């Protein structure tokens, strides 16, 4: 299938969860000159959504020293792009969890690995990195429902061929799960700092995207490899692809950093297992 055909199938699919009303309104609000109080008031119109976001923000996932009591405080700490991403991603992940609980568990694994990467390397875009990683697996989770025939072929090939799953997806479907997840995130009107890194999980980003979002792209890519090492095979990949040279160079990533990232991510996952975040 061509990229246009894939996008059309995605846009017409009844399998995809709808964009939450609050998130749609938030997208329009962020384009103007709205202040934090106005944006917070909009998110708080949905008590369930705001409660889920605060649960995430106060979890070991983000690791803030004090309790974040309201959405206004969360906006100050995380920024508008991250809150917008969470406003869309939390309901979507909840929808996916109802179909396959492993999707939610692996999403937390990815987010822990991403935030561990940001902390270990002292990156400034930790909120964006963690949020992009949290929803980075959406594309793969939705492929069976939107492209059932191709999904069956992909599963068969993945079980018998010595190839990376994302390469098999490209050869059979015409795009890998990262590209599909990025197109979905773009359709949900998420900002480029979130949908571009999702799109580039398994392939090199363009020079333009590297210049604008290179740090986040590299960190999300690294987090994918770390998450696979922690829970090999949980995303369907039978083989762990090496971290791209461009990502290692962008982040000045050495072997000692990977050891630190792995250790931090495992610690955070243990803390999460003792919290109530898994019931979000």
Image (spheres, rainbow, N blue to C red):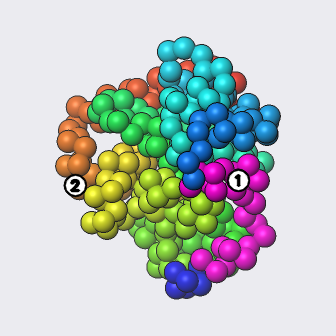
Residues at marks 2 and 1, CA–CA distance in whole angstroms: 40 Å
Q: Which of 40 and 141 is in front in this view?
A: 40
Q: Mark 2 points at which residue?
A: 245
Q: Nearer the viewer, residue 135 or 174?
A: 135
Q: Mark 1 points at which residue?
A: 25
The local crowd at label 2, few if under 14, some if 14 to 19, many if 20 or more residues have their Cα within 10 Å, is few
What secondary structure is marked by label 1?
helix
Q: Which residue is drawn at 60% across and 60% down?
A: 189
Q: Quadrant of residue 146?
A: bottom right
Which residue is situated farthest in the front direction here? Answer: 33
Where residue 121 appears, x then y in whole percent? 29, 33
Q: Magenta segment, which residues?
A: 7-31
Where residue 59 appears, x then y in whole percent? 59, 25
Q: Which residue is drawn at 78% across and 48% down?
A: 98
Q: Which residue is drawn at 52% across and 81% down?
A: 3
Is residue 172 visible in the rendered structure shown here? no
Q: In which quarter of the image is residue 115?
A: top left
Query: Would you place residue 187 above or below residue 97 in this image?
Result: below
Left or right, 185 with respect to 46, comes to: left
């Amino acid at each position: 299938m061509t990229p246009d055909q894939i996008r059309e199938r995605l846009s017409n699919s009844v399998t995809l969860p709808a964009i939450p009303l609050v998130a749609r309104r938030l997208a329009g609000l962020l384009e103007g000159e709205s202040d934090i109080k106005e944006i917070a008031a909009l998110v708080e119109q949905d008590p369930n959504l705001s409660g889920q976001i605060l649960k995430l923000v106060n979890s070991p996932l983000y690791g803030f020293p004090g309790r974040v009591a309201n959405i206004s405080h969360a906006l100050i700490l995380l920024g508008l792009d991250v809150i917008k991403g969470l406003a869309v991603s939390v309901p979507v992940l909840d929808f996916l969890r109802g179909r396959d609980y492993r999707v939610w568990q692996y999403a937390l694994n990815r987010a822990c690995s991403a935030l561990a990467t940001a902390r270990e390397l002292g990156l400034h875009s930790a909120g964006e990195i963690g949020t992009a990683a949290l929803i980075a697996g959406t594309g793969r989770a939705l492929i069976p429902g939107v492209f059932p025939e191709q999904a069956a072929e992909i599963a068969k090939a993945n079980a018998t061929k010595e190839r990376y799953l994302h390469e098999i997806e490209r050869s059979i479907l015409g795009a890998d799960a990262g590209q599909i997840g990025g197109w979905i995130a773009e359709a949900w009107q998420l900002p480029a700092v979130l949908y571009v890194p999702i799109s580039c999980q398994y392939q090199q980003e363009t020079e333009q995207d590297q210049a604008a979002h290179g740090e986040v792209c590299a960190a999300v890519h690294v987090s994918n490899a770390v998450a696979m090492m922690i829970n090999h095979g949980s995303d369907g990949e039978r083989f762990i692809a090496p971290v791209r040279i461009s990502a290692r160079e962008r982040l000045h990533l050495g072997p000692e950093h990977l050891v630190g990232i792995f250790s931090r991510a495992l610690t955070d996952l243990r803390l999460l297992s003792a919290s109530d975040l898994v019931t979000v």
